[in-house]
Amino acid sequence: MWMLPIVAAAVLIGVDQWTKYLALVELKPVGNIVFVQGFMDFTFVENRGVAFGMFSGQRWFILLLTSIITLVLVYYYIKLPKTKEYKPVRFAMVLVFAGAIGNIIDRMRLGYVVDFFEFTFFEWPVFNMADIYVVVGVILLSFLILFVIKDEEKVEKEVEEENE
């Protein structure tokens, strides 16, 4: 059972790195390719910051910060109860982990993150597959924490109230 999240993360990281490789080889020389007119382009960007360009040029700080966050994520993943109810949480954590590792690989190897998806129908930063994994994972994790997972003490209290 412990192999599944490792394989899933490896596949996600592989897809991320493959798409970034294609962007480097095919897109970087031309800069931009219209994908769907008025909706989305493929635009090559060397992202030297994090979300919305924050901490631009602070490569080692970003690497340290994302490495710490990734280690904390792995720690909590290991500590999670190994029950069926936590499978969606584990899935969300694998998404965030794969996205973080995909971007860490770029920062270590290239000194920047390769971004290439650009929405053209509204102003939004250019992004990549790893960014998608992180955003979807964080949204899913937030939803689960806020609306699905119940605190054990709260569940015990609800059971007591029902039995009275």
Image (cartoon, rainbow, N blue to C red):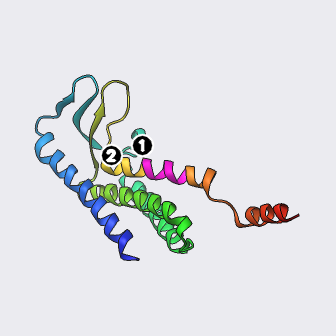
Q: CA distance from mark 1 to mark 2?
A: 10 Å
Task: Measuring from the top left, give residue 157's x and y in whole percent.
Answer: 80, 63
Q: Quadrant of the image for the N terminus?
A: bottom left
Q: Residue at x 45, y 53 (%)?
A: 137
Vertical side of 128 occupied by 17: above or below: below
Task: Measuring from the top left, give residue 82's x and y in whole percent.
Answer: 53, 74
Main SS of the magenta segment?
A: helix
Q: Is residue 140 magenta?
A: yes
Q: Residue at x 37, y 47 (%)?
A: 132
Amino acid at the residue labelled 1: Ala
Which secondary structure lies at badge 1?
Answer: helix
User: Of residues 86 and 142, which is closer to you in this image?
Assistant: 86
144 relative position to 112: left or right:
right
Residue that lies at the very extreme toward the right in this rendered image: 164
Please name the residue that numbered disc 2 is placed on: 48
Vertical side of 108 occupied by 77: above or below: below
